[in-house]
Image (spheres, helix red, strand yellow):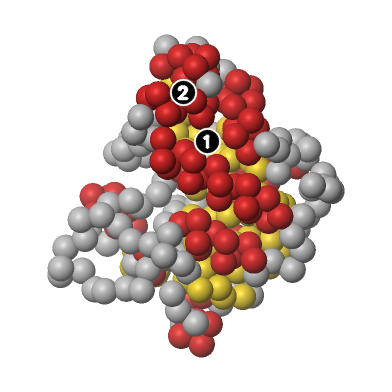
């Protein structure tokens, strides 16, 4: 695959506003997708959109949603294009990336359930990506100390590496022309996620062992990802806790509304 390993600004963004959250009560108003749930009298994804529009590093924004552009109200001003969300996360990612006019340039994928995301967090992530241009995928992870210092009430799935303890963030940068490879990796990992033997076959025994005993380093994890994808990728550590404040269930939605002053 011919690849132009440049990283130029501005970067186009794909904002994912589909999906759903767990344990929603029947009394909660029905919405077309997770990104349209109200927090602070504004949709979750509209909060996230504001961070993108305030970023000096972001250009065109594509919203992936079950709605058409004509169905969006004024809180979505700043959306340049709309793509129809799919039945799965990867289908929605594909819809957003396929709407991009240039496939080999980096595109920022943004989870539309980040109500406290800031332009500073977006800029910091993209500037860090630009310092490592020879990749096809950049994944954000957030330091546990930074997250708990700002949002102690938020639960995360933590992974202990040799350099520290981290959780996944809601920002990913990817070159759209590696979509097929990325989909294949996601399918492989999904099939093997509940079997240690399959995971060992996917990641390698050494990688899995070092992960289990807390000795896996970030470069080792990057190398495992590159083996899976067959292309270079890297992790980007962020100290911006808001980059990992995602709404996954009713409890986290209530916590976000409390911080917004809704409760």
Going by the image, does 197 lie left or right of 179? Answer: left
Query: Where residue 3 appears, x then y in whole percent?
Result: 82, 47
Query: Where residue 165 appears, x then y in whole percent?
Result: 45, 23
Q: Is residue 229 visible?
A: yes
Q: Nearer the viewer, residue 36 or 55?
A: 36
Query: Where residue 158 appears, x then y in whole percent?
Result: 39, 29
Q: Secondary structure at mark 2?
A: helix
Residue 74 disc label: none
Q: Is residue 234 visible?
A: no
Query: What residue lies at 44% left-to-right and 28% top-to-bottom?
Result: 199
58, above or below 145, in the image: below
In this rendering, the label closer to the viewer, 2 or 1 = 2
Q: Which residue is mark 2?
A: 200
The CA span between labels 2 and 1 is 22 Å
Query: What residue lies at 30% left-to-right and 57% top-to-bottom?
Result: 21
Residue 141 disc label: 1
Query: What residue lies at 41% left-to-right and 46% top-to-bottom?
Result: 245
Q: Nearer the viewer, residue 110 or 118?
A: 110
Query: What residue lies at 52% left-to-right and 68% top-to-bottom?
Result: 64
**Dot 2: few (<14), some (14–19), or many (≥20) neighbours within 10 Å?**
some
How many numbered callouts? Answer: 2
Q: Secondary structure at mark 1?
A: strand
Dot 2 or dot 1, earlier in sequence: 1
Query: Where residue 35 appears, x then y in whole percent?
Result: 41, 65
Going by the image, does 137 lie left or right of 68? Answer: right
Locate the C terminus by quadrant.
Answer: bottom left
**Dot 1: few (<14), some (14–19), or many (≥20) neighbours within 10 Å?**
many
32, above or below 104, in the image: below
């Amino acid at each position: 695959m011919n690849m132009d390993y440049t990283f130029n600004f501005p970067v186009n963004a794909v904002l994912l506003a589909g999906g759903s959250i767990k344990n929603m009560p029947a009394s909660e108003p029905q919405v077309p997708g997770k990104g349209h749930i109200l927090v602070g009298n504004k949709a979750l994804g509209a909060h996230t959109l504001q961070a993108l529009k305030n970023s000096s590093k972001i250009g065109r924004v594509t919203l992936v949603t079950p709605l058409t552009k004509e169905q969006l109200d004024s809180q979505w001003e700043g959306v340049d294009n709309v793509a129809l969300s799919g039945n799965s996360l990867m289908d929605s990612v594909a819809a957003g990336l396929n709407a991009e006019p240039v496939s080999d340039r980096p595109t920022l994928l943004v989870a539309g359930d980040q109500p406290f995301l800031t332009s500073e967090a977006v800029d910091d992530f993209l500037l860090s990506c630009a310092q490592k241009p020879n990749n096809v995928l950049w994944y954000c992870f957030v330091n546990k100390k930074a997250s708990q210092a700002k949002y102690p009430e938020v639960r995360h799935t933590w992974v202990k590496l040799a350099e520290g303890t981290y959780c996944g963030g809601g920002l990913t940068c990817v070159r759209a022309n590696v979509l097929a490879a990325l989909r294949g990796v996601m399918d492989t990992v999904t099939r093997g996620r509940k079997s240690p033997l399959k995971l060992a076959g996917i990641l390698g025994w050494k990688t899995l062992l070092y992960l289990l005993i807390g000795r896996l380093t970030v470069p080792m994890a990057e190398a495992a990802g590159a083996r899976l994808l067959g292309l270079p990728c890297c992790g980007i550590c962020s100290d911006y806790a808001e980059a990992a404040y995602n709404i996954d269930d009713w409890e986290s939605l209530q916590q976000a509304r409390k911080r917004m002053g809704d409760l």
